[in-house]
Image: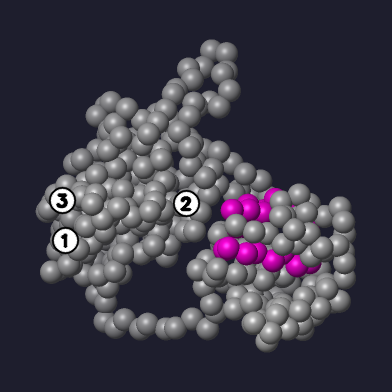
Amino acid sequence: MIKKNLEEYKGIAIFAQQVDGKLSNISFELLGKARELAESLDDKTVTAVLIGDFRQNADELAGQLGSYGADKVVVVDDPCLKDYRTEPYTQALAGYINTFKPEIVLIGATAIGRDLGPRTSARVETGLTADCTKLDIGDYPLQPVPGKEQKHKQLLMTRPAFGGNTIATIACPNNRPQMATVRPGVMQKCEPDTARKAEVINWKAPLEENGCYVEIEKVVKAVSEVEDIAAAKILVSGGRGVGSPENFKLLEDLAKELGGTVSCSRAVVDAGWKPKEMQVGQTGKTVRPHVYFAIGISGAIQHVAGMEESDIIIAINKDEGAPIFDVADYGIVGDLNKVVPLLTQKIKEVKENA
């Protein structure tokens, strides 16, 4: 293992994921969190690493990253990086880390990031905390331990563990960089400032074709039949208390009148009533809609962690002691089979009379 001088590692870098020349939303979310974390570090520089084959639009993408908070944008532009492939992208990102030595590296826990993150961390010989739902800068150990040095200004990475039944906070105090993949939809992106400009650095990555390079013969783009719940402004979410998959028709009718989308809890997915793509929670998706209906959902911590940042939470449950009422802005204690159809009808009447 290479012996590293940890003092050489400075600032925060994020992997700015792009597909077909368009930046993914997770890139802006990571920049927002990086800017917040940087305020607690000695070196407050935030760098976006942009990897691909850009031809003409690298400046445009760098401008977007600057407006969302990047101080620097390192552009790695090469024809062999046109489409995501594990080995060349790993070589590019690992090469950046070994050359520029960022203290913290954040990657989105997307299909690309879940592949790229662990391979890159292994290549640069450091640890990786996967699928984080919370990031902070603080002391490690969290509480002083007699005879053990407490290190300051460490990246504290929080993620669900043991199938989502507990929360673990992990640190990497003795190695650099500190690396994490971050669940999409968890972090808040900053409001863009078009007057803000980033320094653009065009950097040639040490790419070397080897036996791990694959050849992409065909790209097939399929349209998902399930709506993206993370993008919904209104979510009508059902839990085990809905009673049956057929009863979700009540929630679908309500969502239709509201112009919203149906989602569900883990118990519903485990029962086979709805697909995994519709699940809200630690082991599902994290959502931030304007309005979140929690119907027949008890409010276990694993579910609440995925929706507690919603602007307005409305809970409907026959159990007045259900934990969901502790986080709800409005609560209705009653039988959802009676309450939901009445609510749907009232909304329909208001719309007709508007």
Which region shows up in magenta? 289-310
Q: Does residue 267 show up?
A: no
Q: Amino acid at mark 2?
A: Met
SS under mark 3 = strand
The quadrant holding residue 154 is: top left
Quick one: which residue is furthest to the top in this view?
147
Residue 45: give its label: none
- Mark 3 or 2, nearer chain start: 2
Residue in view at x 69 percent, y 84 percent? 353
State whether residue 111 is above or below residue 339. above
Residue underneath mark 2: 187
Residue in view at x 31 percent, y 48 percent? 69
Residue in view at x 59 percent, y 41 percent? 168
Q: Amino acid at mark 1?
A: Asp
Residue 241: give x, y in percent of width and height.
Answer: 81, 68
Q: Residues within 10 Å of mark 2 (few under 14, many from 20)?
A: many
Q: Residues within 10 Å of mark 1 (few under 14, many from 20)?
A: some
Q: Quadrant of the N terminus?
A: top left
- Mark 1 or 2, nearer chain start: 1
SS under mark 2 = loop
Q: Are marks 1 and 3 in contact (CB under 8 Å)?
A: yes
Q: Is residue 61 left or right of residue 189?
A: left
Residue 333: give x, y in percent of width and height.
Answer: 86, 62
Residue underneath mark 3: 200
State how far apart marks 3 and 2 are (Cα).
25 Å
Residue 214: give x, y in percent of width and height.
Answer: 26, 70
Question: Is residue 294 highlighted in magenta?
Answer: yes
Residue underneath mark 1: 59
